[in-house]
Amino acid sequence: MSIEQLEAEAMKLAPEERARLGEKLLGSVSYDLEFEAEWAKEIDRRVQEIRRGEVIPVSSGDMFKDALDRLS
């Protein structure tokens, strides 16, 4: 079913049903936006820590090597 067909079918619903559907759809998008916003904050925090010299970035290769060495 195309988005246009889905829209046409949704418009056949009673106003209360369309509102309920709209809330569900918006809620599913809002969660994703909230999740993305939280990750953006975390990324910014980590970048600031690096810039202030509080942490030293390590390549993924070095990190995995160190983790494997510790497990051995």
Image (cartoon, rainbow, N blue to C red):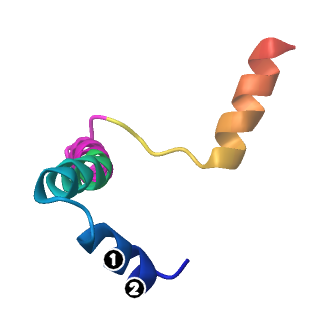
Q: Amino acid at mark 1?
A: Glu
- Percent position (x, y) of residue 52? 19, 44
- Percent position (x, y) of residue 60? 64, 46
Give yes or no for contact between labels 2 and 1 (Cβ–Cβ under 8 Å): yes
- Percent position (x, y) of residue 29? 29, 55
Compared to residue 50, the image places residue 68 above or below, namely above
Q: Separation of disc 2 and disc 1 at Cα?
A: 5 Å
Compared to residue 4, the image places residue 43 above or below, namely above
Between residue 33 and residue 62, name the one nearer to us: 33
Between residue 31 and residue 72, name the one nearer to us: 31
Q: For the point 29% across and 55% down, which residue is it? A: 25
Q: Which residues are magenta?
A: 32-54
Q: Is residue 72 left or right of residue 26?
A: right
Q: For the N terminus, give its image quadrant.
A: bottom right
Q: Amino acid at mark 2?
A: Glu
- Percent position (x, y) of residue 34? 23, 46
Q: Which residue is mark 2?
A: 4
Q: For the point 19% across and 49% down, which residue is it? A: 23
- Kindly state the secondary structure of the residue where label 2 is placed: helix
Q: Which residue is mark 1?
A: 7
Between residue 71 and residue 13, name the one nearer to us: 13
Q: Is residue 47 visible to the viewer in this orientation of the structure? A: no
